[in-house]
Amino acid sequence: MYYTVTKKRIFAALLFVLAAVLAVCGCLYETRSVQAAAHKKELPIYNIKTNEKKIAISFDAAWGNEETQQLIDILKEYNVKTTFFVVGAWVDKYPESVRALAAAGHEVCNHSNTHPHMPKLSQAEMQSQITTCNEKIKAITGTAPILFRPPYGDYNDNLIRTVNGLKMYPVQWSVETCDTRIQNYL
C-alpha cells in the first residue's frame, strides 16, 4: 500500500489541524467565559487596610464570665479598647458583664443569640438569631451593634447577604489564637 503526498492532501491535513486548534481554543475560551460568569463567593470582612500601625483585638463571649472583669482590668491597664462579640444567651445570663464591658468603653457586638451553625439555618432563622441578640445588647448598652461575627467562623453566601441586609457588617478574624484548642489539652 502506497500513500502519495500531494499538495491537496497536505492542504487538507493543515486545514484539519487548524480546525482542531480552533476547536480547542474555542473550548478554552468557553471554559474561561463560564468561569468568569461563575458565582463570586460572598465574604465577611477579615481586615481593613490602613497606613496606621494598628491591630484590632476581639473576644467572643459565649460561655462563662469568670475572667471577664480581670480581662477588663488588664485592658484598662494598657489603655486597650477592643470588641467583644457576645451571644444573646450570655447577655441574658451575665447582664452585669455586658454593662461593665460597655462602661469600660469596649464595643459590644453580635455573635448570635444561641451560638448555632448559622449556615444550617433558614434566612428567617438567621435574621431572628441576629436581631434577637441585637435587641438584648441594645437594651443593656443603649447601642445597637453594627458588627456580626458568625459562631465557629461558619458562614455561607446566604448568611453574608442576610447580615448585609440587616445593615450590619459581617466580620471574621484573620489570626486565630486557638485558645479553645489549647483548653482541650489542659
Image: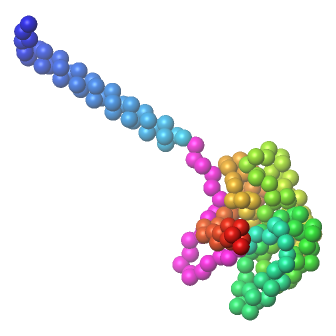
Q: Residue furthest bottom?
A: 77
What range is drawn magenta here? 39-58
- Name the residue rendered at 33%, 27% in the picture: 23
- Name the residue rendered at 39%, 31% in the picture: 27
Query: Toward which corner of the image does residue 45 lie, by quadrant?
Result: bottom right
- Main SS class of the magenta portion in the image: loop
Q: Nearer the viewer, residue 13 or 71?
A: 71
Q: Position of residue 90 (x, y in %)?
A: 87, 67
Q: Position of residue 144 (x, y in %)?
A: 84, 68
Judge whether residue 161 can be spotted in this image: no
**Magenta stretch holds residue 169:** no
Q: Nearer the viewer, residue 29 or 63?
A: 63
78 left or right of 111? left
**Magenta stretch holds residue 41:** yes
Judge whether residue 54 can be spotted in this image: yes
Query: Toward which corner of the image does residue 169 lie, by quadrant?
Result: bottom right
Quarter of the image that includes the C terminus: bottom right
93 left or right of 62? right
Quarter of the image that includes the N terminus: top left
Instruction: State the count of labels.
Output: 0
In this rendering, the answer to whether 172 lies above or below 32 is below
- Name the residue rendered at 71%, 67% in the picture: 184
State the scheme by which the image is colored.
rainbow
Q: Residue furthest top?
A: 1
123 left or right of 47? right
Query: Toward which corner of the image does residue 74 lie, by quadrant?
Result: bottom right
- Name the residue rendered at 68%, 67% in the picture: 181
Q: Position of residue 100 (x, y in %)?
A: 87, 81
